[in-house]
Image (tube, rainbow, N blue to C red):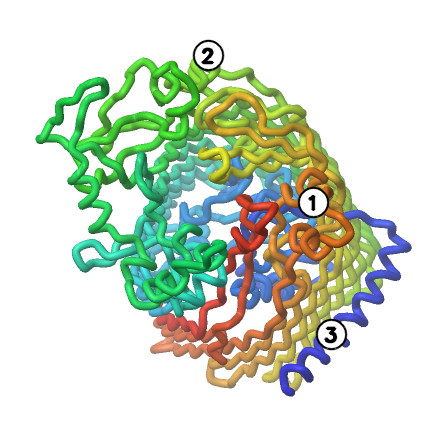
Amino acid sequence: MKKKLLCTFFLLVTLNCISQTDTLRVSQNQKSDSTVMNYTIPIYSTGGSDAESDLDEQDASSLLQSSRDLFTQYASFQFGTARYRMRGYSAENQVVMINGVNVTNPETGFASWSSWGGLNDVTRFVEARFGNVANRYGSSGPGGYTNIDSKASSFKKGTRVSYATANRVFRHRVMLTHSTGLMKNNWALTLSASARWGNEVYVPGTYFDAKAFYMSLDKKLNDKHLFSFTGFVAPVEKGLSTAATLETYVVSGDKYYNSLWGYQNGKVRNASISSTSRPMFLLSHIYTPNEKRKVSSTIYHTFGKSSLSGLNFNNAANPKPDYYKYLPGYFYAKVDNTGGDAATYNWETDVNTRQINWDELIALNQANLYSASGTQSVNTNETRARYILENRVENLSQTGFNLIYNERKENVFISMGVNAFHYINKRYKEMEDLLGASFWIDVDQFAQNLGVDPLIQQNDIENPNRKIYRDDKFGYDYAITINKAEAWALAEYTLRKADIYGGLTISDSRLWRTGYVANGKFPTTSKGESDKLNFLNYGFKAGGTYKLNGRNFITANLNILSRAPEASNVFISPRVRNDVVDDIKNEEVVSSDINYLAKYPNLKLRFTLYSNQINNQTWLRTYYDDNYNTLVNLIMTNVNQTHRGFELGIEKTVYTSHIFQFVSGFAQSYYSNQPKLQAWQDNNNTSLYFNRRVYLKNYKLGNSPQLVSALGYRFMGKKFWSLGVCLNYFDKIYVEPNPDRRTTEAAGKFQDNEKELAQKIIGQEQIPSYFVLNVNTSKSYRIHKRYSLNLNASINNLLNTKNTITGGYEQLRWDQQQVSKFPNKYVYMTGTTYMLIINFSF
């Protein structure tokens, strides 16, 4: 009954806002955008005191997001368990910067936040502005930007020691940071280090082990010249978990079932280990000839490896315990209905059935005595591996420079800059563990039956049947190279009743693939350089603020830009050949918003209507197909996505100590056209099909809730303590669709009496709505006016709800005649989680 009343309350408020949205949307005739990738944009609020500064003296472009915007706070800290993405954007729509340098990955468009993970003390004070905003550091898209100031002279003098314990990702965290501030000799030094670790903190088979080190050294030559050096590295290794089918969760009896681990000699071992270590170094010169001008120039270099391990096998059974042919449902679906009860019993009682049986894999390897091809003799001293653990490695290097010029002239603020970089990412596989065998043969098992030529199955035709030992490269070996140069300019005008801004950007990028080995399946197109692809792009943004009075504002923004397609989607089979996807185009983005902002001493409010469109996207996924006994590359081109909706945040303070908050956001995020679909076998240069029309129009983007609402209350005590309670509501959550199931060839052949089967193929599942109750508290102590002790505690999902599904997707592998054969996969929300943090500063 309580849940129904709460649902009714949230829906009444939200529907009232939706009706306002629809009215305004008709008058504004705005459009929208979004993307389908499952990455969340991290959002932070600035750590300064600008939230309480004089509004009339703030720049127009900073009014909306430079302060601690309530909605972005909730999106960051309350909605994370729901996999919420603000406005449905994936991370390539937001720019992440360090000292004005764009540190997003040029190949994918995503920032690798793990590269500075654990360095909270030196990255927590940032300038973050979400949406279509003016950016004084460079160009940015509809997701705005985040700029981290890492200069040593920006930190106050002092030392900070921190300890945290949690049951989320890690169990323990320790951090130590020391800063000298700007000393009398005009030097400044900041050092920081941390460690985070934990085994099976919540999900079985997982673990987390991370370190982080940071140093920044500044030298102020005089009032005009400052040199700053920053270097950091954050190596991290973690055992992963994965989504599973509902059947798997049921027969295992575990909502957090994880198929990626098993026992080896009685000890837990995870097969999917993610490891990353990418140092970055920046050297900056800040020239300030006077108080109105500043020129910042930076050269930077980042490099390092990331890897993801996984099981591979040859001439052997699939080692994955949740392979569909091992599940009870597969046996029950047989005509004779045999084997299902036995499979169910084994899943429920035998851990080696439902998890990876490492000991069995090793035993099978050790029993596989090697016989050379074409001979009958057996070498009793060597065994050929049927199963291995391999590492899929990315080894990148990026070098670039960045120049930013800022100047204030009376009521005009001018920003402009240029930047360029050279990026190369080498991808290959390394042998991690032979699992008891002597060696592995570097051949493609999926190509063994393609023809009579024995070289077809060779991954390296110049070294046929090469024996692979631990740490050897094998399988594939290639690189993606990107060169890019960009120039941009921005002007902001401050008037008595209105502020306006406008900006332009132009960039030129070139990318290509370089293969280092000749593959037997593609002997002429796998080795050497591909064609060099050039992309010329532009951007235009403009916006304005109308000052109704000193407390009420209306702002509007427009952002039109183009950008190169993601390099990871450009090549049909990048592991083995240089062939480019047909009809590759620049992506086109049109994004706009209109906002009402009110800011009073006891009341803050923001209401935003936004409308965005992203066109000409390319979408590439790879999956294993039983019918072809190989990997298949599924490619969609000309993908358009629309995203429109509203955001509302209200904060009311009562009697200085009681703060009431309400936020709500509604989105319409969907595919807005009929893309073209093609499929290619990874071991064949002939397409399985080409230019199939995908009837994907109006299908919703998956996983992120499209309706969120929250009620929050915080009590601010007199002796530096506070208590907060927040009730969050999530709805309109959809499973990500498989485009191949929305083609005429797949679902257009059914008769009228087969509508139910057709609906199972083309229908899109909606995940049930749910509530989450979170609480947090904090307490601060001042000791002898010199020391500070801070305690923070937070509990998420206080009611310990464990039956909530937060996201899911349709498998790309599917059977037209038996849709349930490859059911959707899901992820459950964790139960109650906590974090306790203790900070001591002196």
Q: Say which residue label 3 marks.
A: 11
Q: CA distance from mark 2 to mark 3?
A: 60 Å
Position of 584 relative to 334 (above/below):
above
Question: CB under 8 Å between callouts 2 and 1?
Answer: no
Query: Which residue sits furthest right?
Result: 27
Depth check: give the residue in front, 252 or 31: 252
Earlier sequence position, callout 1 versus callout 3: 3
Q: CA distance from mark 1 to mark 3?
A: 35 Å
Query: Whole-percent x and y of residue 1?
Result: 65, 87
Going by the image, does 99 lie left or right of 712?
left
**Which corner quadrant of the image does residue 312 belong to?**
top left
* Residue 194 seen anywhere in this rendered image of the structure: no
Residue at image coords 53%, 44%: 813
Going by the image, does 171 lie left or right of 720?
left
Going by the image, does 398 lie left or right of 41?
left
- Which tag is nearer the camera, tag 2 or tag 1? 1
Q: Say which residue label 2 marks.
A: 524
Q: Say which residue label 1 marks.
A: 747
Query: Whole-percent x and y of residue 670?
Result: 71, 50
Query: Which residue sits furthest left?
Result: 381
In the image, what residue type sits under mark 3?
A: Leu
**Circle on res. 202:** none
Query: Whole-percent x and y of residue 134?
Result: 69, 45
- Which tag is nearer the camera, tag 1 or tag 3? 1
In the image, what residue type sits under mark 1?
A: Ala
**Which corner quadrant of the image does residue 526 belong to?**
top left
Q: CA distance from mark 2 to mark 1?
A: 38 Å
Earlier sequence position, callout 2 versus callout 1: 2
Disc 2 crowd, CA 10 A, few/some/many (<14, 14-19, 20+):
few
Q: Quadrant of the C terminus?
A: bottom left
Depth check: give the residue in front, 423 or 50: 423
